[in-house]
Image (cartoon, rainbow, N blue to C red):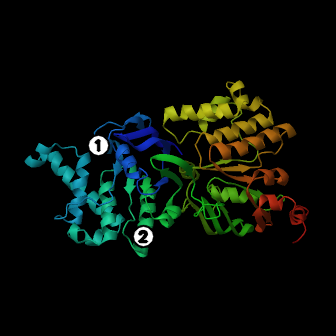
């Protein structure tokens, strides 16, 4: 995913007190990033700095590469960075609907004088704002109470109204300041679903919250603050530290057929944020069919496939690439008559941020130096191993969250197989890209993955930690066609 917001060495001093000290992190487009920490850690100050309610003592905040720190708050909001407050700020004597309509005026085309005079553009704005307010309230489940006085709302509805006011400004990134504070269990559960729905609407979310069960359930990544500093940034994990509370990819009870011949039977598996998972098994076991189902190249007959909590089975492949899923197909499939450069740029066809695409291209060339050496060379004239580097690099150009690799060692010289394996490990480790690896060479697959699923005739026969499966005799039995 593209980097939407960047916080660079942000610092805020109040006299001799250091409230925020050199904090740096990025918020990626389409994610939910949570900021947690004890009271006094600097979370609210950080929000004020990002939304430009305060000027930093040092450092800066960038939105799509442009500096926004130091600008007036309404200019920052108009640019797409909008915040809510711990205490929801409303016009208590006005209706729920009117509160949302007023928030639309941030993006009004008419002047204040035009609204007083009832100009044509002002009347058009008012009509548009009213329709938009009704749509937002219906979306958030508040349509039935649109005419109710805002001051009479219970806590859960009040928080939802705060989000509605934020959405009325058409934000690119919404900063939610303790949206679950003061809620009971049922209200929190509904609010979590609401925040997810807002993200599905295309809004990136930066969240400050003390409710840790809700944070762990909803977050893609977490930044931990401690007295103004950022000691940790990671994907949320369960108490054992082994996997995310909510898997990045969930494949549940999937069945897939080619005409009347089944390829997958009731297959379920998970890939967690930041891990490498291997799919192993003999030819025809169903490994590639799983990747084709995930990427929308084959429709499933039953079951569900979810990515970041959203159901994706039935979505077109190009939409899945935009969501953060990239596949490197078996047999490489480069564009043989095109140069290395043009092959790589084809991987960024869903992106329009030219500066970021250039940075990604440079990062890919740094990871695969051979591609730099052959930058202007036709892809079809390179060796199999070099072409494999090329198609992996092409997939990375889309800035994926999940990378699907189908038989990356197939037809490659042994020395280059080791180079490819090291590259996969580095991509997962350094770029925090989750990897689902289909590989006939089970020994390499199990050595570079954290977990694995062994398939046999379209079903999962074994699963577990890769280190344990590496010497499991049952894996050998599967490859030799035996029964467990």
| Residue 73 numbered mark, or none | 1
- In percent of width and height, residue 60 lies at 41, 36
For the point 32% across and 70% down, the residue is 155
Whole-number angstrom distance, CA of label 1 to CA of label 2: 29 Å
| Mark 1 secondary-structure assignment | helix
* Residue 143 visible in this rendered orientation of the protein: yes
Q: Left or right: 108 with respect to 180?
A: left
Is tag 1's residue or tag 2's residue first in the polypeptide sequence?
1
Looking at the image, which is closer to me, 307 or 94? 94
Residue 64 placement (x, y as % from top left): 44, 38
* Residue 330 percent location from the top left of the image: 75, 48
Q: Residues within 10 Å of mark 2 (few under 14, many from 20)?
A: some
Q: Find residue 154 and report its image quarter.
A: bottom left
Q: Which residue is mark 2?
A: 188
Q: Is residue 451 above or below residue 188?
A: above
- Residue 326 lies, in percent from the top left, at 62, 48
The circle on residue 5 is none
**Which residue appears farthest toward the left when viewing the image?**
117
Q: Considering the image in quadrants, where does the C terminus appear?
A: bottom right
């Amino acid at each position: 995913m593209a980097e939407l917001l960047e916080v660079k060495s942000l610092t805020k001093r109040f006299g001799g007190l250091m409230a925020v000290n050199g904090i740096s992190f990025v918020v990626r487009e389409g994610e939910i990033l949570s900021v947690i920490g004890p009271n006094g850690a600097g979370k609210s100050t950080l929000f004020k700095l990002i939304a430009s309610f305060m000027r930093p003592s040092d450092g800066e905040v960038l939105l799509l590469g442009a500096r926004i720190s130091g600008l007036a708050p309404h200019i920052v909001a108009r640019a797409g960075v909008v915040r809510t407050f711990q205490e929801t700020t409303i016009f208590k004597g006005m209706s729920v609907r009117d509160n949302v309509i007023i928030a639309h005026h941030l993006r009004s085309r008419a002047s204040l004088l035009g609204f007083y005079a009832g100009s044509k553009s002002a009347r058009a704005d008012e009509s548009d704002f009213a329709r938009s307010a009704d749509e937002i309230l219906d979306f958030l489940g508040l349509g039935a109470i649109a005419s109710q006085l805002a001051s009479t709302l219970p806590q859960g509805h009040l928080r939802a109204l705060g989000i509605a006011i934020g959405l009325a400004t058409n934000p690119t990134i919404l900063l939610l300041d303790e949206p679950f504070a003061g809620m009971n269990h049922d209200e929190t559960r509904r609010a979590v679903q609401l925040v997810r729905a807002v993200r599905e609407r295309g809004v990136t979310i930066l969240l400050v919250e003390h409710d840790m069960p809700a944070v762990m359930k909803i977050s893609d990544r977490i930044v931990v603050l401690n007295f103004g500093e950022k000691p940790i940034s990671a994907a949320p994990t369960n108490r054992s530290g082994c996997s995310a509370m909510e898997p990045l990819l969930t494949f549940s009870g999937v069945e897939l057929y080619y005409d009347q011949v089944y390829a997958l039977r009731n297959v379920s598996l998970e890939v967690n944020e930041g891990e490498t998972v291997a799919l192993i098994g003999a030819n025809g076991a169903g490994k590639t069919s799983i990747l084709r189902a995930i990427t929308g190249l084959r429709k499933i007959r039953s079951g569900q496939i979810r990515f970041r909590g959203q159901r994706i089975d039935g979505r077109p492949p190009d939409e899945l690439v935009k969501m953060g899923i990239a596949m490197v197909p078996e047999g490489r499939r480069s564009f043989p008559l095109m140069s290395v450069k043009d092959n790589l740029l084809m991987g960024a066809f869903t992106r329009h941020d030219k500066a970021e695409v250039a940075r990604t291209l440079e990062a890919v060339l740094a990871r695969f130096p051979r591609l730099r050496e052959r930058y202007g060379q036709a892809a079809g004239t390179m060796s199999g191993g070099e072409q494999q580097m090329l198609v992996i690099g092409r997939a990375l150009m889309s800035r994926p969250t999940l990378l699907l690799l189908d038989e990356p060692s197939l037809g490659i010289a042994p020395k280059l197989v080791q180079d490819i394996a090291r590259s996969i490990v580095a991509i997962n480790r350094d770029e925090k890209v989750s990897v689902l690896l289909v590989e006939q060479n089970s020994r390499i697959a199990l050595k570079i993955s954290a977990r694995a699923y062994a398939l046999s005739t379209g079903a999962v026969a074994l699963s577990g930690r890769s280190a344990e499966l590496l010497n499991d005799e049952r894996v050998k039995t599967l490859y030799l066609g035996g029964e467990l």
